Image (cartoon, grey):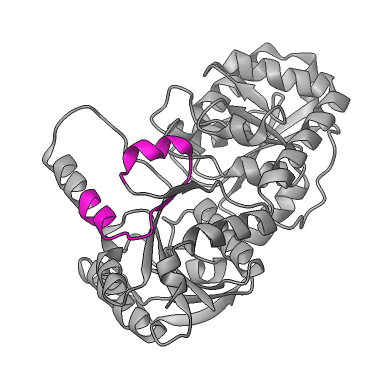
């Protein structure tokens, strides 16, 4: 028996709402649960140990730990306290008895830690004491500002200690992250496609374009805002055949809300933060998915936009900036923006509207590219081989 304990902060909708958490990452949670489903297909007994936390709000509300299944995956949610300092301490220590109990499970045991988080630190130590294989899942690299600071020095020390305690190497969200860790071996995992739950419409009018997730300048929202402003001002005839759907949260939401009130074409429809079920329904109505993290931005080489896999696997045409490993994954099955230029984005959108058959074929190429690399069966087996590859562990 091979056991994997995935230590992270993944949240399902019911727990997020129950605990009043608004600072979570839906994309990260979705990726974690899908990876766990893929590992299950590869006969790995996978348990998610979630901190179940967000920014505390000072209300002193306390939530007990609980166990439930999310999409068939057993999830142990640690307790959470909306109280300063005590909130962090509770999360820091409450993982210890969980790992101690899991030690009694038969078979090989490995722990996977989602990013280097201080709140995992004692869990990482006890995992080493219990002789679990410890692996870092590095999803976000540090942003290099080039200037010295005390906090940056502390971060480097913590990073070094954390990596020293990881005995099994690192999963990387993109190849550029190899430069941010000395851990070996490494393996790039971009995520996994979902068994197709929605039937996406082909390119029909009006073309539904979706921007979702964290709606901020750092993730490229400003590029779309500037493009929509130009379209509303210029009043091109073709814009009546396109509309934009905005889902999620972030510092650019207010600008989209202003654009949504402007009755000139194209229409902008605001959805805000939705549940997973409503989001899946939205995907079913979407023909074009946007991933616009700036080419010149700080996130261009420090992460991978997992939404491109989500979009392409559902037959949605991906329009993405040419960052990270997106081209490596989708090849010629997407439309790429090589510059952070609103007029370039407008030109690409115009091409989609005026060439619907070619756009449909391009979406199909993207779907095939994902099917060749990121199905649950393929990813699950590759991760199993990477995580449990050490012959020393196989002998135990």
Which quadrant: the C terminus?
bottom left
Q: Which residues are magenta?
A: 159-182
Which quadrant: the N terminus?
bottom right
Residue furthest left as drawn: 150
Left or right: 249, with 149 as reference point: right
Look at the image and say whether residue 250 sits in the magenta stretch.
no
Viewer-closest of 355 and 366: 366
Q: Quadrant of residue 239?
A: top right
Identify the residue at image location x=58%, y=77%: 69
Viewer-closest of 15 and 68: 68
Q: Compared with residue 158, is residue 392 higher up or lower down, i.e. above or below?
A: below
Left or right: 248, with 168 as reference point: right
Left or right: 285, with 334 as reference point: right
Identify the residue at image location x=43%, y=22%: 296
Q: Quadrant of residue 256?
A: top right
Q: Is residue 83 visible?
A: no
Q: Position of residue 298 (x, y in %)?
A: 38, 30
Q: Position of residue 248 (x, y in %)?
A: 55, 47
Q: Position of residue 170 (x, y in %)?
A: 40, 52
Q: Is residue 53 visible?
A: yes
Count of marks, rendered view: 0
């Amino acid at each position: 028996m091979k056991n994997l304990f995935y230590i992270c902060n993944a949240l399902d909708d019911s727990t997020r709402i129950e605990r009043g958490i608004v600072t979570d990452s839906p994309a990260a949670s979705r990726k974690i649960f899908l990876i766990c489903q893929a590992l299950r297909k590869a006969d790995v007994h996978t348990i998610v140990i979630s901190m179940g936390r967000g920014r505390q709000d000072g209300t002193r509300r306390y939530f007990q730990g609980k166990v439930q299944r999310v999409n068939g995956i057993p999830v142990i949610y640690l307790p959470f306290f909306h109280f300063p300092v005590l909130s962090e301490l509770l999360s820091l220590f409450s993982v210890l008895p969980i790992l101690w109990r899991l030690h009694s499970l038969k078979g090989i045991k490995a722990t996977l830690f989602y990013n280097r988080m201080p709140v995992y630190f004692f869990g990482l130590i006890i995992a080493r004491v219990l002789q679990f294989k410890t692996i870092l899942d590095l999803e976000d690299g540090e942003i290099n500002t080039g200037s010295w600071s005390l906090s940056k020095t502390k971060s480097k020390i913590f990073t070094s200690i954390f990596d020293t305690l990881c005995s099994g190497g690192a999963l990387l969200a993109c190849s550029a992250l190899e430069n941010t860790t000395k851990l070996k071996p490494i393996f790039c995992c971009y995520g996994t496609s979902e068994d197709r739950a929605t039937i996406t419409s082909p390119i029909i009018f009006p073309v539904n374009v979706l921007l979702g997730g964290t709606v901020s300048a750092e993730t490229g929202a400003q590029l779309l805002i500037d493009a929509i402003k130009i379209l509303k001002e210029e009043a091109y005839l073709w814009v009546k055949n396109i509309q934009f759907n905005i889902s999620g949260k972030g510092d650019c939401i207010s600008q989209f809300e202003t654009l949504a009130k402007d009755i000139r074409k194209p229409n902008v429809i605001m959805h805000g933060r939705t549940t997973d079920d409503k989001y899946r329904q939205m995907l079913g109505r979407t023909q074009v998915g946007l991933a616009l993290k700036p080419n010149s931005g700080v996130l261009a080489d420090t992460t991978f936009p997992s939404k491109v896999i989500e979009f392409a696997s559902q037959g949605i045409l991906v329009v993405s900036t040419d960052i990270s490993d997106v081209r490596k994954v989708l090849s010629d099955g997407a439309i790429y923006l090589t510059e952070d230029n609103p007029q370039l984005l407008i030109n690409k959108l115009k091409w989609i509207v005026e060439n619907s058959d070619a756009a449909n074929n391009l979406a199909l190429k993207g779907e095939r590219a994902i099917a060749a690399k990121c199905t649950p069966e393929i990813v699950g087996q590759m991760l199993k081989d990477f995580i449990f590859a050490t012959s020393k562990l196989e002998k135990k």
